[in-house]
Image (spheres, rainbow, N blue to C red):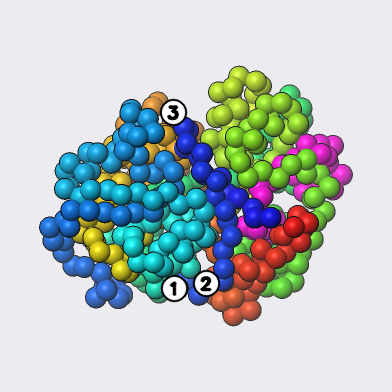
Amino acid sequence: MKPYRTKRPLAVLAMVTVVALAAAGCGSSDSNAKDTAKAPTKLSKGEGALNIIAWAGYAEDGSSDPKVDWVSAFEKDSGCKVNVKIGNTSDEMVQLMKTGQYDGVSASGDATLRLIAGGDVAPVNTKLVKNYADISPFLKDTQYNSQDGVNYGIPHGWGANLLMYNPATVSPAPTSWSVVFDKNSPYKGKVTAYDSPIYIADAALYLMKHDTKLGIKDPYALKQDQFDAAVKLLETQKANIGEYWSDYLKAADAFQKGSLVLGTTWQVIANTVEGAKAGTVKTILPSEGSTAWSDTWMISSKAKHPNCMYRWLDHITSPSVQAQVAQYFGEAPANPKACTETEKGFCDQFHATDADFAAQLHYWTTPTKKCLDGSGDDCIDYQQWTKAWNDLRGS
């Protein structure tokens, strides 16, 4: 059984597998000053074509919906004809990038480190992307898009893994993730959790706040005893779980029907439930904070159309395009200037400009043997996370 991370725009469903292999360790920095020799210092004329791998909903040309099109304007302005390959999984995206047939990819945090470690993506000169200056600082130079002071990508959009509950059933209103991990939960059988090995980080985050003796500093950098404790907590939680979700539409449907009343969610799921008018749900960021996801546009180290790719990076991060993508896909835009062009209240709902909110998030990052918190070379890598999750789920 393969767990899926479902990434679906409001009108397009794409099943996304979160299966990652171990990657080399990484670091972060304030700039991409190092290794700039591998990144261009200026742009030349576009090559006339652009081949990219993208999640469904990230590069729309009007073929899915005539009203949804930000690719055609780019083609007209740049002279670069865009060819889009929809990537259904992070694993698939990594393999496709290895072929050298694509100029870039919209990679999630469970793929970015593999692409960097494999030499499949090139450093990015952010000075050549004028809109980069406007991107939210908390998305820049992170452990999932930079390494050793070198920037390898341009942030695209992000979202938090929130706690959703039905207030008609769940009382008192929860404030902590303890409500989903309580072995004596009164909501046993109606709790949900995200179906992926990366969900182990949610348990680790909870333990980081509630069992300080374990010494967890980063929910993606776990030593053996810390990892074992997180898995044990999930084994206890399993008795409460009515359904692990991967397809967000199915998760929304379960809340609408009342078979689920509490658990991990994305804001877009809550919006879907509310839109169906089948009941009221609420979402909160619990006191412990939460895990989250952030996607990054990366350039192939073998790109045949690098000048067109750089022009795409600037186009896709422009305020107007960011607004279109965010609303169509259901995420917070990386460029907060997009919020002046979204529907009223959209960015507030997705916390797009809330730095304090973002500071409480721990973005998905592929766990590696080299501990991401710098504590050594004895952390549990994602291959072992995957094995433990499959064992837990009975796969």
Q: Nearer the viewer, residue 309 or 215?
A: 309
Residue 149 visible here: yes
Q: Whole-Å distance between the Cαs marked 1 and 2? A: 8 Å
Residue at 42% across / 34% down in the picture? 328
Q: Which residue is mark 3?
A: 345
Q: The residue under label 3 is which amino acid type?
A: Gly
Q: Which residue is mark 1?
A: 118
Give the x, y percent position of residue 93: 46, 58
- Identify the mark nearer the N-term, 3 or 2: 2
Q: Whole-Å distance between the Cαs marked 3 and 2? A: 39 Å
Residue at 72% across / 68% down in the picture? 226
Q: Are marks 1 and 3 in contact (CB under 8 Å)?
A: no
Residue at 72% across / 60% down in the picture? 390
Q: The residue under label 1 is which amino acid type?
A: Gly
Q: Nearer the viewer, residue 172 or 337?
A: 337
Segment tinted magenta in the rendering: 179-204
Q: From the viewer's perspective, is the residue at label 1 or at label 3 nearer?
A: 1
Q: Whole-Å distance between the Cαs marked 1 and 3? A: 41 Å
Label 1: which secondary element: loop
Numbered circle sitting on residue 23: 2
Give the x, y percent position of residue 84: 35, 49
Q: The residue under label 2 is which amino acid type?
A: Ala
In the image, residue 252 above or below residue 99: above
